[in-house]
Image: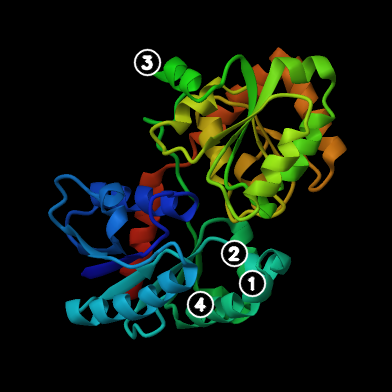
């Protein structure tokens, strides 16, 4: 088969969907040397998706102003559909929730979440357009990959006519990269980022959906001695709401460190030296940071919402969404109870062992084969 992979993602800052795409592509290259793959991606992302010694994988790069979402969507719809026809694809897999609708061949669609349906207030005036494009993409797809059981449940709820097409393929974690053992450059990296002593870690975009303001409020409510001992580290790219987060952090009695976006070559060091990873999101399609943290032996605190209980299981502390006092209590427990941290670290390691990119790639390949026979 000649398979096309729609990887027209936002360049330079691969988070969430980009991390999923890069790792799944590399895992497919490791297990499949038979089928031919064409990777459609922005020119700036070519280095991130370069696959050494995989002769059956080739890249088709495009240049456009990817900083503007509308331009990126138009490029995906027009350029990718034309390229697919020219190359005579047997199947196209779109990794971005919204497929190129002008493509007329067999289509696989990965749905990461249904945020425009479940949390419409986060998307403002674009909500109706995103809903329409996602619904149309799901209808066009021959098969839909949901990254969690919760995402499948959301598809059942919001797009019930497409429910029979869904296969759940959870994310994986690279155990060679995300591991508890300290790396030789860990301490220098932390020092370079201005991180000293013990700290609580958040990884993700500084946006409303991640409830970073709630995390800052919970940190502010910690007892003074705890705040003086544990700093709060926010690791992730700035979003449109980042300026408000920084203003709020400036008024907190404690130390808040902003690292900016960090690639996956640097994130493991932050995970494994943190006292805890906190993800207080109001909605997640999967929640990759909690899995990466558990694989590094780091205790996890997250909200009891959407996919997060499914990923964490019994290996972390779950708190009520939007309940700042509940989050503060969980953070205080972890910061002051070394035995609890050790217990959750061990549980997290065991839990993370059940997720791998190889397993995700094999299940994805099964979906391809089921369509083409």
Mark 1 and mark 2 in contact? Answer it, CB < 8 Å. Answer: yes
Circle 4 is placed at which residue position?
138
Numbered circle sitting on residue 156? 1
Numbered circle sitting on residue 184? 3
Image quadrant where residue 142 sits: bottom left
- Which of these two is toward me, 343 or 133? 133
Classify mark 1: helix, strand or loop: helix
Q: CA distance from mark 1 to mark 4?
A: 12 Å
Q: CA distance from mark 2 to mark 3?
A: 41 Å
The residue at 83%/40% (across/down) is 324
Circle 2 is placed at which residue position?
152
Residue 373 visible somewhere in the drawing: no
Q: CA distance from mark 3 to mark 1?
A: 47 Å
Q: Position of residue 135 (x, y in %)?
A: 56, 79
Q: Is residue 40 above or below residue 138?
A: above
Q: Position of residue 59 (x, y in %)?
A: 21, 60
Q: Is residue 117 above or below residue 220?
A: below
Classify mark 4: helix, strand or loop: helix
The residue at 37%/47% (across/down) is 23
Of callouts 3 and 1, which one flags the residue occurring earlier in the amino acid sequence?
A: 1
The quadrant of the image that shows the N terminus is bottom left
Q: Nearer the viewer, mark 3 or mark 4?
A: 3
């Amino acid at each position: 088969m000649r398979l096309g992979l729609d990887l027209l993602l936002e360049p330079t800052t691969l988070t969430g969907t980009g991390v999923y795409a890069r790792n799944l592509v590399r895992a497919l290259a490791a297990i499949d040397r038979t089928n031919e793959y064409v990777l459609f991606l922005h020119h700036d992302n070519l280095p991130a998706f370069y696959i050494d010694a995989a002769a059956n994988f080739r890249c088709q790069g495009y240049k456009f102003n990817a900083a503007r979402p509308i331009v990126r969507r138009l490029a995906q719809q027009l350029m990718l559909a034309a390229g697919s026809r020219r190359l005579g694809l047997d199947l196209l897999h779109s990794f971005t929730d919204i497929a190129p609708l002008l493509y007329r061949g067999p289509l696989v669609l990965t749905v990461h979440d249904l945020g425009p349906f479940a949390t419409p207030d986060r998307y403002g005036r674009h909500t109706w357009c995103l809903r329409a494009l996602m619904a149309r993409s799901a209808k066009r797809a021959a098969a839909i990959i949901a990254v969690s059981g919760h995402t499948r449940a959301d598809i059942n709820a919001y797009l019930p006519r497409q429910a029979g097409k869904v296969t759940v393929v959870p994310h994986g974690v690279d155990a060679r990269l995300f591991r508890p053992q300290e790396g030789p450059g860990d301490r220098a990296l932390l020092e370079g980022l201005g991180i000293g002593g013990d700290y609580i870690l958040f990884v993700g975009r500084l946006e409303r959906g991640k409830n970073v303001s709630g995390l800052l409020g919970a940190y502010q409510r910690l007892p003074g001695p705890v705040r003086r001992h544990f700093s709060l580290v926010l690791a992730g790219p700035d979003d449109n709401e980042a300026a408000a987060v920084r203003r709020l952090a400036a008024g907190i009695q404690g130390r808040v460190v902003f690292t900016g976006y960090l690639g996956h070559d640097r994130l493991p060091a932050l995970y494994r030296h943190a006292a805890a990873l906190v993800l207080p999101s109001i909605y997640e399609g999967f929640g990759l940071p909690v899995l990466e943290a558990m694989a590094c032996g780091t205790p996890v605190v997250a909200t009891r919402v959407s996919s997060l209980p499914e990923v964490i299981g019994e290996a972390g502390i779950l708190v009520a969404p939007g309940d700042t006092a509940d989050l503060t209590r969980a953070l205080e427990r972890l910061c002051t109870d070394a035995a609890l941290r050790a217990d959750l670290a061990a549980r997290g390691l065991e839990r993370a062992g059940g997720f791998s990119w190889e397993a995700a790639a094999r299940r994805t390949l099964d979906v391809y084969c089921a369509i083409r026979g």
